[in-house]
Image (cartoon, rainbow, N blue to C red):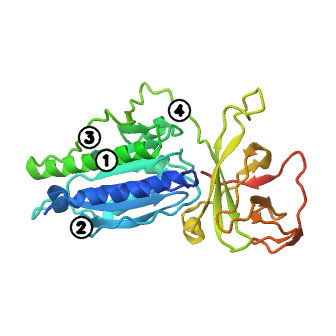
Amino acid sequence: MRRLPVYFLVDVSESMVGLPIQQVQEGMRTIIQSLRVDPYALETVFVSVIVFAGKAMVLSPLTEIYNFYPPSFPIGGGTSLGKALECLMDDMDNNLQKTTLEKKGDWKPIVFLFTDGNPTDEFTADFRRWNEKYRRHCNLIAVSIGDNVNILTLAQITDNILLLKDTGPESFSAFFKWVTASIKTTSMSVGEDCSDEIKLPPTSGINLEKIDPRTYNGNTDENFAVIHGRCQTSGHDYLIKYARRNHGSENSGYRDSRLFRLVGAYPIDNAKYASLSSGSQAKINTRTLLGVPTCPCCGNQTAVVVCECGNVFCVGESDYNKCPWCGVHGTLEQADEYGINVARGLG
């Protein structure tokens, strides 16, 4: 039986922390549950999940649909789209079945790329390799989650670019039903008329827009600031996510696009975060960050306290505190009017 490989190339950068990654996680479960009851998909579809942040890794190798279980998505620092494509191409080289004189190989793979930011790595060589050797032999659909992605960057690797502007739960649910329908229709096509071109269903009725890069003018920069903190009580790590604020504070009459508003704070698996993150020397001043969360690990009232070592941790009601990063202990002092520069992730 010829396989229909379906790859999910998922951005797990820091800007995806919180609701976006939870919605992708739930969407993957919905897709698999639906495909498991489709006779055409059961016969042909094999699924793989590759995640990327500052680095990329195969989270789930190509597996037949009835044996596939959606993995838990980690979070990392950076958005290395070049490394993601490199990981995908290497996996295809090693695991796709080629056509020989004795038998037919796999059908043309489907690749769904989900990303919400712009690349932070040098991707030129990987893009060139993709376009020269793989692009014609794959169906790549790039999905911009939100409108912070540079569409012209995605246009360098695919003609199928979709923009999901509304990232609310209902919109995500409708979108993943659309993804499921795309896979089902293509699996039926390879079974009935042996056509392995992807069959994309209409996007009408859902908040999903097909983008023509030749006429698109909505290019924006990456719009998140993410701070890596550590819980003083438990020693566990967390991320604090801020989104760019374009309209100043409620009490000001000016617009200041340098400000970021709090989205939330989220515990992370530090080992997985480190394994997926590339180094960052970027800094951000605390005066540009609006809002301070409680610690998501222990509930301490303030999750953004900066040690003299430059790292962020949480504090509660005690006047005496110990930095879980470097071990320095003592009492806290108020920052001056100029704020403090702290490390930020690549997003």
* Mark 3: few/some/many CA within 10 Å (<14, 14-19, 20+): some
Q: Quadrant of the N terminus?
A: bottom left
Q: Amino acid at mark 2?
A: Tyr
Label whose residue precedes the other's in the sequence (3 or 4): 3
Kindly identify the amino acid type of the residue bearing the numbered disc 1.
Lys
**What amino acid is labelled 4 in the image?**
Asn
The secondary structure type at the circle numbered 4 is loop
The secondary structure type at the circle numbered 3 is loop
Q: CA distance from mark 1 to mark 2?
A: 19 Å
Residue designated by label 3: 200
Label 2, label 4: how far apart the Cα atoms are: 40 Å
Alpha carbon separation for disc pair 2 and 3: 23 Å
Q: CA distance from mark 3 to mark 4?
A: 25 Å
Residue at 33% from the left image edge and 46% from the top image edge:
140
Residue on which disc 1 sits: 177
Q: Which label was assigned to residue 66? A: 2
Are dots 2 and 4 in contact, CB under 8 Å?
A: no
Return the disc, 3 or 1, that comes first in the chain's sequence: 1
